[in-house]
Image (spheres, coloured by chain):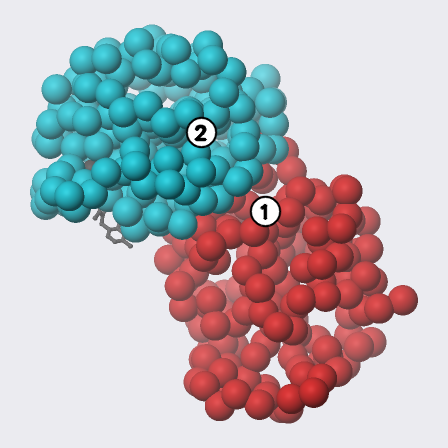
Amino acid sequence: MIRSEILKEIAPILRDQLVVCNIGIPSQELHAIDDQPSNFYMLGTMGLASSIGLGLALAQPKPVVVIDGDGSILTNMGTLPTIANNVANNYILMIIDNGSYGSTGDQPTYTGKKTSLAKVAEACGCERVVECKDVDTGAVLQDALDSGEMTIMVVKCDSGNAKMPVITMDPVVIRDRFMKAVQA
Amino acid sequence: MSISSKIVDDVVAAGIAFVTTVPCKQLAGVIDEVEARPEIYHIPSNKEDEGMGLCAGAFMGGKKPMIIMQNTAIGVTINTLATLTQFYRMPLPMLISYRGELREPVACQVEMAVHTKALLNQLLIPTFHFHKEADAEELPEILSYTFMCNKPVAILTDASFWGGYGDQ
Ligand SMILES: Cc1ncc(C[n+]2csc(CCOP(=O)(O)OP(=O)(O)O)c2C)c(N)n1
Ligand SMILES: [Mg+2]
């Protein structure tokens, strides 16, 4: 499965959660599949989805699901020790590990080679780390939500992108409606 | 009362409850104070752009955030300041040690000092410079200004403000 197929499958779970979504095509896909005020789309700033989500989870009690990418985690690898040492049990970091920089044309990342993000997360001190296959994403995500424990998911899937339109919504609108959903 | 505890008193009084830090020798006292206050969730970050991401999330979660960092981090945070903090219009007070000014013992620090104000200026970031201890009297106003205008705001604190570098 490619990322967009996974997002289609888990959309019914995501629509009831606060979601922080990775820059580029991941956000475009989520936006096209099931736009919700409770989705925070990153339009730039590669690497910071996991950090934004952690700050959000620490600041308020609702569950937060971050849809991140392997390339973005690699560029902000310092995020994993911060996550491990600031436990927020309402925080789920779902890394879509397609082994590539999808948005920029599927150039390979090191996670498709020797590097295991699940092992890195464990070594950083993250306690609930689940690596799963694309087909199991929905079940593992639901299980993570039900566990009430901070969870790092590494979803191994195929590289590839669906053709979706660019998000033209104003960033302040995205942020404003998201904050209203947080407070709702 | 020490200048560090005065600063953190103002931070707490401004309602700031989420502070991320990357250390500088000059900021050690402030960071100790931040860590000691029960009103503040102190979350050390590994890189300043990561810290700004944490602050963006905390802000959207309803907490007033702040970052404490060294001016050498201006370069690595430019993209984040422009495409996250400014693009989504989020407030972020940045208490910055302004290394490389008078009394600086480390020559390398001067190399970023000469770019610091130019970069902040280029980013249209409101910038305040604390040179004498009395300058910190404006801190409460600067903090309320930051959350009034929803912008990143820089507070540069130089060596003269902190009283030099101790034994160096
Ligand atoms: C600082 C910076 N460098 C490069 C880019 C270009 N860029 C945008 S998205 C992306 C790929 C992200 O890959 P990943 O996080 O794995 O997400 P995927 O699209 O594969 O799901 C890159 C390299 C950028 N936006 N910012
Ligand atoms: Mg990827």
Q: Secondary structure at mark 1?
A: strand
Quarter residue B160 falls in: bottom right
**What label sits on residue A127 in the rendered view?**
2
Q: Amino acid at mark 1?
A: Ile
- Chain identifier for the cyan-coloured part of the image: A
On the image, the x and y values in percent for residue A173 come to 45, 33
The residue under label 1 is B43
In-front residue for pair A60/B45: B45
Q: Read off the chain for label 1.
A: B
In the image, B38: left or right of A149?
Answer: right
Q: Is residue A80 above or below residue B108?
A: above
In-front residue for pair B106/B134: B106
* Callout 1 and callout 2 share a chain: no
* Circle 2 residues within 10 Å: few <14, some 14–19, many ≥20: some
**What label sits on residue A39 in the rendered view?**
none
On the image, the x and y values in percent for residue B129 come to 66, 75
